[in-house]
Image (cartoon, helix red, strand yellow):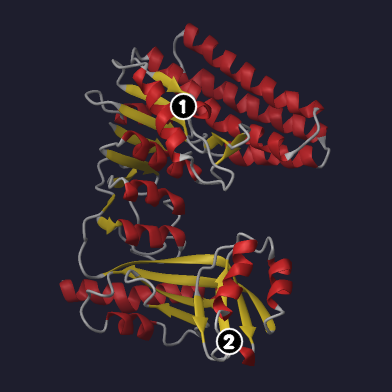
Amino acid sequence: MKIMKFGGTSVGSAERMGAVSQLLPTQEPVIVVLSAMSGTTNHLVHIGQELAQGNTDQAESLINQLEQHYKQVVAQLYKQETSIEKGKQVLATVFQDIRARLDLPYSGVTEKIILAQGELLSTQLFQIFQEEKGIKSVLLPALEFMRITPDEEPDQAYIREHLNQLLAQYPDNQLFITQGYICRNAKNEIDNLKRGGSDYSASIIGAAVKASEIQIWTDIDGMHNNDPRVVKNTYPIAELSFDEAAELAYFGAKILHPSSILPAQQGNIPVRLLNTMQPEATGTTISSKKSGSKIKAVAAKDGIIAIKIKSSRMLLAYGFLRSVFEVFERFKTPIDMITTSEVAVSLTIDNDKYLPEITEALQRFGTVEIDSGLTIVCVVGDFMEDKPGAALRVVQSLAQIPLRMISYGGSKNNISFLVNTKFKEEALISINEGVFQEREEANA
C-alpha cells in the first residue's frame, strides 16, 4: 500500500483537486492524506481569534466569507447535480457546526474543533469528486483512529490497531481518503498535530500499515540545497538519508514537517517529496540508503534565543549540566544547540513560552544572559566520511560573518552556526558560493 499526502496548495482549488485526482494510481491500494485547502486554516485561526476576544459579529462575518468561498468551489468542482447537492450538504453541516460555536463559551477545545473543519471539508469534497468520476473510494475518518497520548505523542499501538480494523472492512477497495493534521487526544477531544502536521499524519499512517512508500506532494520539486527565496540557482537534491532529511527539516527546510521523518525511518519506509505542479520531476527520495559522502544542503531556522549561564562554580562541578537540562525538561522546552567552557554553558531554544520561568530557575546556578533575534544556519551532509577539509570549507565560507556559536561533532550529519538574524541571508549566500558552487565547478 502507498501513502500519498497532498498539501493545501495541491488541493487549493477545484482545478488543483482535479489535477490531484489524475495522479492517483489505479492498480494498487493507496491512502490519500489531505490538508485543508490553502488559506482555510489561516481563515479558521482568524475566526477563533475573534471568538476568543468576544467579537462574535466579526467572527460570523468571517464564517460567511469562508462559506461563500466554498460554495464557489462546489460550483466549480462538480458537473452533476447530485454531486453539487452532496457538496452543498457537506458545507451546510460543517458551517452549521462552526456557527454553533458562536453562542458557546470559547476554550482551547473550541479552537481545536474549529481548526479541524478545514481537513473535514477538503476530504469530503474530494471523496464526492471521486464518486462523480465513477471511482470507488472510502472516506476514513481520522478522528476514528488518529490519537495522541497525554504527552502529545502519537499513540502508535492505538493508531495501528484502529486503522487496520477500518481498512479490513473494505478488502476490495483500492482508494482510501483521510484527513491529515487532525486527531483526538487522550481525553478523546478533537485535537491536532500542530501546523504542518499533515506530513506527520502521512508518516504515522505509513508506519501503521507498513506502506511500501510515503509520498509528500507539495508545490516544490523536492528539497533544495539552499533556500530558493534567498539564493539564486538552487537545485533539488535527488537523494537524502533519513538523518540528513531530519536535520534539514528541523533546522528550517519548509518543505517537510520536522516530526514526519521518524515514523518512516523506524519502519524503513522510503519517503518521496514530489511536486503536484510538475509531477514528472524526480523530486527527492529519503531512505536508509547512504547517499554519498558530500555536503548536501543548508537550512536556516529563525526565532532562536540564546541563553548563557555563567558561574565559577561550574569548574569540575559534578551534575551541573544535568541540573541545567532538568530545568528545560521541567518546562518542556527543547534545546537546539549547546556549547560549554570551564565557567559557562551557552544553549539555544526556539520557544519562549516559559522563558521567564526558565530564566528564574537558572539564576540559582549563576548569571543568566538572554539574547534573541538569532538564527541557526545548519549545513547538512556526511561530514565524517567526506574528504578532509569539508568542515573547514564551510567555516571559511563564513569568514566575514560574526559567529555566535558553532556546533560540530554531535552528529556526523551537520555543522551548525548561530548568527544574528540580520546576517542570515548573507550567510546562506556565502555558503552557496563557498561550498556548492565550488563543488559544481569541480565536477564540471
SS at mark 1 in the image? helix
x and y percentages locating residue 388 in the rendered image: 22, 83
Coordinates of residue 51 in the picture (x, y in percent): 77, 37
The numbered disc on residue 368 is none
Q: What residue type is labelled 1?
A: Ala
Residue 318 image position (x, y, % from top left): 55, 83
Residue 276 seen anywhere in this rendered image of the structure:
no
Q: Is residue 195 above or below residue 87?
A: below
- Residue drawn at point x = 45 percent, y = 9 percent: 80
Q: Which amino acid does label 2 sit on?
A: Ala
Marked residue nearer the N-terminal end (2 or 1)? 1
- Horizontally, residue 383 falls left or right of residue 430, namely left
The secondary element bearing badge 2 is classed as: strand
Report the side of 189 relative to 432 (left or right).
right
CA gap, disc 2 and disc 1:
57 Å
- Categorize mark 2 by other alpha carbons within 10 Å: few (<14), some (14-19), many (20+): some
Q: Is residue 292 left or right of 193 when viewed as pictured?
A: left
The residue nearer to you, when weighing 2 against 429, is 2
Observer-nearest residue: 211 or 63?
Answer: 211
Image quadrant of residue 442? bottom left
Residue 14's disc number: 1
Q: Which of 209 and 93 is in front in this view?
A: 209
Q: In which quarter of the image is residue 100?
A: top right
Residue found at the far left of this picture: 444
Q: Mark 2 points at which residue?
A: 344
Q: Is 334 on the left or on the right of 291, as rendered?
A: right
